[in-house]
Image (cartoon, rainbow, N blue to C red):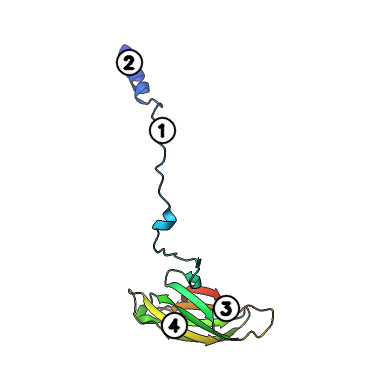
């Protein structure tokens, strides 16, 4: 019986809760350390003072839009797209106004640059012009990795 009591006391002492609590290590400003990030699924909008807004997702990055005329927009960026081919549409929330495709200067797994110009006009004054960049699935033709960007 003494042996059982001794084992219980030793067990209780071994499970002592007086363990020194450690302070979490502080990491120096992570924002400065992050060079590039990939967002799988959600569009990311970041602010860059030299070029305006930049948009990205899993397949498109550093995408910028510059209004070059009353109805003209220049779109630049990089894409990691199979066979360097991606599609785009311009819609106003109700209708597809235009659609097309573009090529990057390199196919996946490389990030290829692209630069193209579109002309689009609102059909209704209270509508919002939206450019959607996307990769077309080779399997079933569906849209993948859509990146929506408000033009106007």
Residue drawn at 68 percent across, 83 percent down: 124
Residue 121 in percent (x, y) is at 61, 86
Q: Secondary structure at mark 1?
A: loop
| Residue at the spot of label 4 | 115
Observer-side mark, 2 or 3, equals 3
Residue drawn at 61 percent across, 83 percent down: 95
Q: Quadrant of residue 24?
A: top left
Give me the C-alpha separation between circle 4 and circle 1: 55 Å
Which mark identifies residue 21? 1
| Residue at the spot of label 3 | 151
Residue 6 in percent (x, y) is at 32, 15
Crowding at mark 1 (Cα within 10 Å: few <14, some 14-19, many 20+): few
Crowding at mark 3 (Cα within 10 Å: few <14, some 14-19, many 20+): some
Residue 41 in percent (x, y) is at 47, 66
| Residue at the spot of label 2 | 6
Give me the C-alpha separation between circle 1 and circle 2: 29 Å
Q: Is residue 46 above or below residue 141?
A: above
| Residue 95 in view of the camera | yes
Residue drawn at 37 percent across, 26 percent down: 15
Most distant residue in the top direction: 2
Residue drawn at 40 percent across, 76 percent down: 79
Observer-side mark, 2 or 4, equals 4
Crowding at mark 4 (Cα within 10 Å: few <14, some 14-19, many 20+): some
Observer-side mark, 4 or 1, equals 4
Q: Is residue 53 above or below residue 31?
A: below
Confirm or deny contact between disc 2 and disc 4 (CB under 8 A): no
């Amino acid at each position: 019986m003494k042996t059982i009591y001794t084992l219980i006391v030793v067990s209780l002492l071994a499970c002592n809760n007086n363990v020194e609590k450690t302070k979490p290590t502080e990491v120096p400003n992570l924002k400065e350390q992050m060079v590039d990030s990939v967002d799988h699924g959600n569009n990311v909008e970041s602010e860059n003072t030299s070029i305006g807004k930049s948009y990205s997702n899993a397949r498109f990055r550093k995408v910028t839009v510059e209004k070059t005329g009353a109805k003209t927009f220049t779109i630049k960026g990089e894409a990691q797209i199979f066979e360097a081919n991606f599609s785009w549409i311009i819609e106003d929330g109700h209708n597809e106004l235009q659609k097309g495709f573009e090529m990057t200067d390199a196919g996946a797994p490389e990030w290829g640059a692209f630069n193209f110009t579109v002309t689009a006009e609102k059909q209704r004054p209270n509508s919002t012009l939206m450019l959607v960049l996307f990769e077309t699935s080779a399997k079933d033709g569906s849209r993948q990795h859509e990146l929506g960007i408000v033009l106007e």
